[in-house]
């Protein structure tokens, strides 16, 4: 077997960067750590894609005693003299069930090119291996994609209690799929040993040369398989990065610590939904990233973002923005507003992006404390930031701004290392040149300040109170995700605004975005809802009626349909797949507790609205 040893980097006579540069280069981010971990690893995987889609897996596991011993006695048989590492690494590896967290990407190119930073690839200029394993920073000529192999990798070492990870990759080299395996550690600081100053960076691998090299070929793959740190098949390209002893000290956005492997993976999976949902939805050719999150062999289930009450409006807005990215928006986008943002005074690339949003009535949907936000994104289609915007006390705004590809580099340059904001001052522009990022952000801000001072558009007006719309644009089904509901009272004397915490009698609320689906009945729309009751309320004798209507281009319900035109049909009220009532009406007592749905068959190529009303006695 190849001799595996440790190499600790010395400062060169001309100087070098110490370990702190790698670990702190990200700077401070407003994003909780495990969300940042997901963003950085996923962006790097996406940048390495070989086609239009990738697979991305996060797997937390405990190695059995045999594998724990193999890891300790084979790869990490030698320990560096670094005082900040030796003790923590031993502690992490001494367990008979070593904890690991492995991130794997499939359908990517792997880490190819030379394995030494001082050797250039004479053919392709491929530097992916040295960019990730050796170098700090990124050459400007590499351009701007979603992430960076230069500085974002610092999250891997922060994620490990031992500041250590094992990198296994399968890449094309000289026409063959070539496995490579190397371990890395980045300490907290430089240190002195035997009179020599060291940077605090360490590698474990083949020590036959003057520096450590990766283990390559069949021995590398055999070791990775034996350790259980990669799911890659022998013939495929990709990379698996294993964090040794993931830290249990990081909290989420609510300050709840992720102090178990289950909580760590749950936070990472939720981060994928929050920041990478554009890759989870079908924008025409299916989801572009297939996610898998596993803890000790059990896969976590992820709620599709289009079915999520928070993310649903963003998803629908994104699909509309994406469909009209290079042209005019579709005619009927109710209840969404879709508009291009143009920098008319720019010399070139005047189309800055597309703004798409909807307004929701807080007095109906019961979200009085939720802020209005616009999800900012550019070509890699990850959410950069949820931008808070001006709103009114009644209407909440949800939407997206999708930067136009012609200005993608400008928006990329404006991002800090953590890719979590757009800072116009980061752009390097010629004297007196106009700043496209500043223009776009100013336009977004002004647009919603105008709305907050004026009257809401028809999509949020009062006469739409109990209606949820399903928009169809360019042949793609779009759920509006406009959660709605109404509170029904037996008394007409109260004029106070409904409060979601305690309705006086009961409130019907659209609990999730409607879903367009094809089944044995053809095209149908499922409208999920819940019923919230007040204290001491008795549902006996109460009836609800569902009313479905076609929406016109301006968002108004169709009152006089053309002669011979078919209208929407109520197919029934359901609890899960169980039919409760096939009529337009249902007993209120039959839909209490849990989520129910109304199934509607829409006429072809129409937008349909659903209202649920009390049957007056």
Image (cartoon, grey):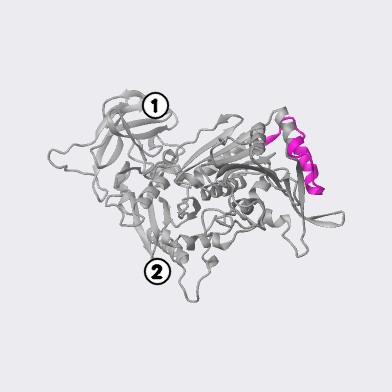
Residues 472 and 118: in front is 118
> Would you place residue 349 above or below residue 50 in this image?
below
Mark 1 is surrounded, within 10 Å at the Cα level, by few (under 14), some (14 to 19) or many (20 or more) other residues, namely few
Based on the displayed image, in which of its 4 quarters is residue 151 positioned? Answer: bottom right
> Would you place residue 548 above or below residue 82 in this image?
above
Q: Earlier in the sequence, mark 1 or mark 2?
A: 2
Determine the secondary structure under disc 1. loop
Query: How far apart are labels 1 and 2 at the CA level?
Result: 53 Å
Determine the secondary structure under disc 2. loop
Which residue is found at the position 76% from the left and 41% from the top? 89
Which residue is found at the position 67% from the left and 58% from the top? 118
- Expressed as whole percent of the image width and height from the top left, the position of residue 47 reads 52, 50
The disc at residue 348 is: 2
The magenta-colored residue range is 72-99
Instruction: Judge depth for marks 1 and 2 and give the one in front.
Output: 2
Check the picture and name the quadrant holding the N terminus: top right
**Residue 496 in view here:** no
Identify the residue position indicated by label 1 in the image. Answer: 576
Mark 2 is surrounded, within 10 Å at the Cα level, by few (under 14), some (14 to 19) or many (20 or more) other residues, namely few
- Expressed as whole percent of the image width and height from the top left, the position of residue 142 reads 54, 59
Q: In the image as oriented, which residue stretches furthest toward the right?
A: 194
Which residue is found at the position 50% from the left and 76% from the top? 431
- Expressed as whole percent of the image width and height from the top left, the position of residue 278 reads 45, 46
- Expressed as whole percent of the image width and height from the top left, the position of residue 354 reads 38, 57
* Horizontal arrangement in the rendering, residue 23 relative to residue 266 (left or right): right
Check the picture and name the quadrant holding the C terminus: top left
């Amino acid at each position: 077997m190849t001799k595996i040893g440790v190499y600790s980097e010395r400062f060169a006579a001309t100087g070098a960067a110490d370990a702190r540069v790698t670990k702190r280069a990200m700077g401070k981010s407003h994003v909780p750590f495990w969300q940042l971990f997901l963003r950085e690893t996923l962006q790097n995987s996406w940048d390495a894609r070989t086609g239009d889609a990738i697979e991305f897996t996060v797997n937390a596991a405990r190695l059995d005693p045999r594998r724990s011993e193999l890891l300790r006695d084979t790869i990490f048989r030698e320990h560096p003299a670094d005082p900040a590492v030796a003790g923590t690494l031993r502690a992490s590896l001494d367990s008979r069930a070593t904890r690991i967290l492995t991130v794997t990407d499939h359908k990517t190119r792997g880490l190819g090119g030379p394995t030494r930073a001082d050797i250039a690839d004479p053919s392709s200029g491929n530097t992916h291996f040295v960019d990730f394993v050796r170098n700090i920073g990124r050459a400007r000529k590499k351009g701007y994609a979603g992430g960076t192999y230069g500085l974002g990798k610092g999250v891997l070492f922060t994620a490990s209690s031992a500041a250590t990870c094992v990198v296994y990759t399968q890449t094309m080299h000289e026409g063959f799929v070539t496995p490579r395996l190397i371990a890395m550690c980045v300490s907290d600081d430089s240190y002195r040993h035997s009179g020599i100053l060291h940077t605090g960076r360490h590698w474990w691998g083949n020590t036959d040369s003057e520096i450590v090299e990766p283990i390559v070929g069949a021995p590398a793959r055999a070791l990775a398989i034996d350790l259980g740190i990669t799911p890659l098949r022998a013939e495929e390209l990709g990379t698996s990065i294993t964090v040794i002893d993931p830290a249990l000290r990081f909290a989420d956005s609510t300050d709840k610590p992720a102090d178990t492997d289950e909580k760590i993976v749950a936070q990472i999976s939720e981060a994928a939904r929050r920041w990478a949902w554009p890759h989870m939805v079908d924008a025409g050719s299916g989801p572009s990233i297939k996610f898998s999150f596993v803890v000790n062999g059990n896969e976590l289930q992820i709620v599709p973002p289009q079915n999520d009450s928070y993310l649903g409006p963003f998803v629908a807005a994104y699909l509309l923005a994406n469909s009209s990215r290079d042209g005019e928006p579709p005619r009927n986008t109710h209840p969404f507003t879709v508009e291009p943002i143009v920098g008319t005074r720019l010399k070139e690339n005047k189309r800055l992006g597309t703004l798409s949003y909807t307004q929701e009535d807080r007095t109906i949907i019961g979200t009085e404390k939720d802020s209005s936000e616009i999800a900012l994104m550019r070509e890699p289609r990850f959410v950069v930031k949820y931008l808070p915007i001006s709103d009114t006390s009644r209407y909440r705004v949800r939407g997206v701004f999708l930067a136009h590809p012609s200005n993608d580099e400008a928006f990329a340059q404006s991002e800090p290392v953590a890719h979590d904001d757009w800072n116009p001052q980061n752009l390097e522009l010629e004297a007196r040149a106009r700043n496209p990022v500043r223009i776009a952000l100013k336009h977004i801000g002004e647009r919603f300040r105008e709305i907050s001072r004026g009257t809401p558009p028809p999509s949020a007006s009062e006469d739409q109170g109990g209606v949820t719309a399903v928009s169809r644009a360019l042949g793609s089904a779009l759920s509006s995700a406009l959660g709605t509901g109404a509170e029904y009272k037996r008394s007409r004397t109260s004029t106070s605004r409904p409060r979601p915490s305690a309705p006086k009698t009961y409130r019907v609320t659209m609990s999730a975005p409607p879903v367009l689906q094809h089944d044995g009945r053809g095209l149908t729309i499922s409208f999920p809802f819940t019923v919230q009751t007040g204290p001491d309320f008795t549902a006996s004798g109460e009836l609800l009626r569902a009313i479905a209507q076609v929406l016109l281009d301006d968002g108004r319900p169709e009152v006089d349909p053309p002669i011979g035109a078919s209208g929407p049909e109520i197919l029934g009220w359901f609890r899960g797949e169980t039919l409760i009532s096939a009529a337009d009406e249902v007993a209120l007592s039959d839909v209490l507790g849990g989520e129910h749905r109304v199934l509607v068959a829409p006429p072809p190529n129409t937008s349909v609205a659903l209202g649920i009303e009390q049957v007056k006695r």
